[in-house]
Image (cartoon, rainbow, N blue to C red):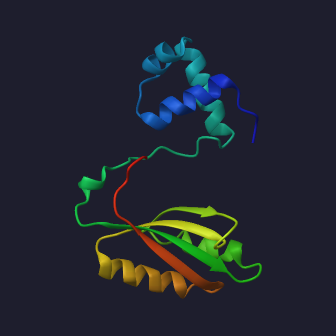
Amino acid sequence: MPALDDLDRSLLALLRADGRMPVAVLARELGISRATVTARMDRLQRDDVIVGYTVRLRDVAEPGAVRAVCLIEVEGRATDAVIRALRGLAEIESLHSTVGDGDLVAELRAADLSALDSLLGRIRRVPGVVNSRTNLLLASVLR
């Protein structure tokens, strides 16, 4: 991955806050031309720094949805295979490698507790997963 300069980091911060911000507004906020913004965004996409744009929903947009964080312990060198298997589960909103308790951390969203229970069962049945610990998320105080 190429090194990011201060302008790249400022542009990425604005896009994190609003991925649909028009180029003209980005240019005005950054004090640069629209052509420079477009060139930077093109380069960041080409270099796989920006890998996509998405919609973030408020928690109230899905009343009754259950959110959780799952620490997943992986057997030996099975991490890559486990990651490939977990990518296929739509209820996993993000997946991170980590050190400490567990090898992977998954952020989960399910329709209700029963759906979460089913999801956890599917995660535990993935070959290479040896253990998991899950914490329910009650309220987001900072996102």
5 left or right of 22 in image: right
> Along the horizontal axis of the image, is 140 left or right of 62?
right
The correct choice, above or below, for 96 with respect to 54 in the image is below
Residue 43 relative to residue 16: left or right: right
- Answer with left or right where residue 25 lies relative to residue 126: left
Q: Nearer the viewer, residue 125 or 58?
A: 58
Q: How many marks?
A: 0
In the image, residue 47 lies at what x, y percent?
69, 39
- Residue 75, image x and y in percent? 71, 83
The residue sitting at 30% across, 54% down in the picture is 59
Image point (64%, 35%), residue name: 44
Residue at left 53%, top 16%? Answer: 30
Whether residue 19 appears in this view of the structure is no
- Seen from the viewer's position, the closer of residues 82 and 52 is 82
Nearest the eye: 82 or 101: 101
Q: Quadrant of the N terminus?
A: top right
Does residue 110 appear in this view?
A: yes
Query: Which residue is located at x 59 percent, y 76 percent?
Result: 72
